[in-house]
Image: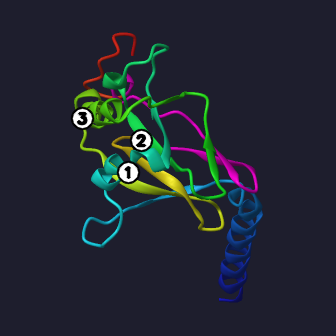
Amino acid sequence: MGKIKINKFLSFFLVTMIIYSCAPVLKNYGSLRMVSKSQNKVTIQDLINNWEDYNIYFSDKYDDYDPRKALGIMFDPKNNDTKLVGDRWKRIKSQKDLIVATQWIYPNTRLEPWLSEILGPDGRVYGYLYYSYGSVTFKVVDDNTMHVFGLDDPADYGPGSLNIYN
């Protein structure tokens, strides 16, 4: 009976140490929080209507500028001290392009998009992400800047993939 208690304690202690050893790494990364439609929060239509208040970018897997190929849209508010940056994001040039990009996320991914807040490790809102598929990585660059990695195209993965090389 005593051995079981010691083994449980050691197991608990090891798991606790592993979790705490990962904690410093987590404070360098951001996260997403889905914006609930039932709450009186911002909507995608609010963002479209107030598009001039944001630096807006879309992510795709192509080199050219075509909002019809958007996989997701990132909104970086101009009126705060935070900044969103990324390598695979193209700046939206007009409200018309923004509307086109929002309309093409579903046909491109075959999944319904949703709106999420982009949060820093301290819980501060850096902006918004409107997208429909996959995990997104947000890495802190400095106190006010977050790097947002590009979005995955669901057509590149899994059963029913459109990628003939899988």
Work out whether 28 lies above or below 68: below
Q: Which mark is residue 103?
A: 3
Of labels 2 and 3, earlier in sequence is 3
Q: Amino acid at mark 3?
A: Gln
What is the CA distance from the residue labelled 2 to the residue labelled 3? 19 Å
Of labels 3 and 1, earlier in sequence is 1
156 magenta-colored: yes
Give the residues in magenta: 136-157
Q: Residues within 10 Å of mark 2 (few under 14, many from 20)?
A: few
Q: Is residue 119 left or right of residue 75?
A: right
Q: Residue at x 30, y 72 (%)?
A: 40
Q: Which residue is mark 2?
A: 134
What is the CA distance from the residue labelled 3 to the residue labelled 1? 17 Å
Q: Is residue 41 left or right of residue 55?
A: left
Q: Residues within 10 Å of mark 1 (few under 14, many from 20)?
A: few
Q: Amino acid at mark 1?
A: Asn
Q: Please, which residue is most extreme toward the front here?
A: 52
Q: Is residue 122 visible?
A: yes
Q: The C terminus lies in which quarter of the figure?
A: top left
Does dot 3 land on a helix, a strand or a loop? helix
Q: Residue at x 29, y 34 (%)?
A: 105
Does dot 2 land on a helix, a strand or a loop? loop
Q: Which residue is mark 1?
A: 50
| Residue 161 screen position, x and y as percent | 30, 22
What is the CA distance from the residue labelled 2 to the residue labelled 1? 27 Å
Of labels 2 and 1, earlier in sequence is 1
> Looking at the image, do the residues carrying marks 2 and 1 touch, with CB atoms under 8 Å apart?
no
Work out whether 28 lies above or below 131: below
| Residue 111 screen position, x and y as percent | 25, 39
